[in-house]
Amino acid sequence: MIWLYGLLCVLGSCFPLAAFLPWLLAHGADVSGFIRAADANPISLFAWLDVLIAGGCILLFIWHEGRRDDIAHYWLAMLATILVGGSLGLPLFLFMREWQRSTKR
């Protein structure tokens, strides 16, 4: 599973960033424009609300499990979730957890 989580980390960062970086290059750090685009229609608002709620759940999961299982540097997965999204943060945390478990054997 560790290699699958690693692959999901790559995919979970490449695909979202490939969609976001062109917008960022075209508009810069225009936060109000970003919010207008996210709120452009009901389906985009639905998607963003889903992402925000899922991201919050992922952050809570990483924080709780990271502390409970004493995962080294679990905060990196939280930072990845905030900076890129749950598509990177969750598989990164699972990768870190599996890596730590495999080295303790």
Image (cartoon, rainbow, N blue to C red):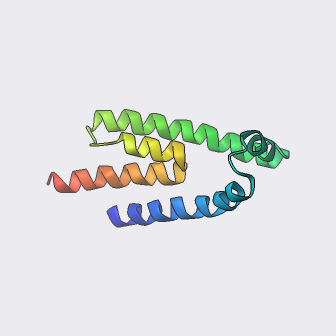
Tell me if 81 is positioned left or right of 66 in this view: right
Residue at image x 21%, y 56%? 102
Residue at image x 75%, y 41%? 35
Q: Position of residue 49 (x, y in %)?
A: 69, 40
Residue at image x 79%, y 47%? 37
Quadrant of the rendering where the N terminus is positioned = bottom left
Q: Position of residue 86 (x, y in %)?
A: 53, 48
Q: Position of residue 10 (x, y in %)?
A: 47, 64
Quadrant of the rendering where the C terminus is positioned = bottom left
Q: Position of residue 80 (x, y in %)?
A: 47, 47
Tell me if 102 is positioned left or right of 80 in this view: left
Above or below, 10 relative to 104: below
Q: Say which of 28 and 88 sits in front.
A: 28
Above or below, 32 relative to 90: above
Query: Which quadrant would residue 71 be assigned to in this image?
Result: top left
Residue at image x 71%, y 47%? 47
Query: Which quadrant would residue 53 be assigned to in this image?
Result: top right
Q: Say which of 3 and 85 sits in front.
A: 85
* Number of marks in the rendered image: 0
Instruction: Specify the farthest residue to the left.
Output: 105
Q: Say which of 57 and 17 sits in front.
A: 17
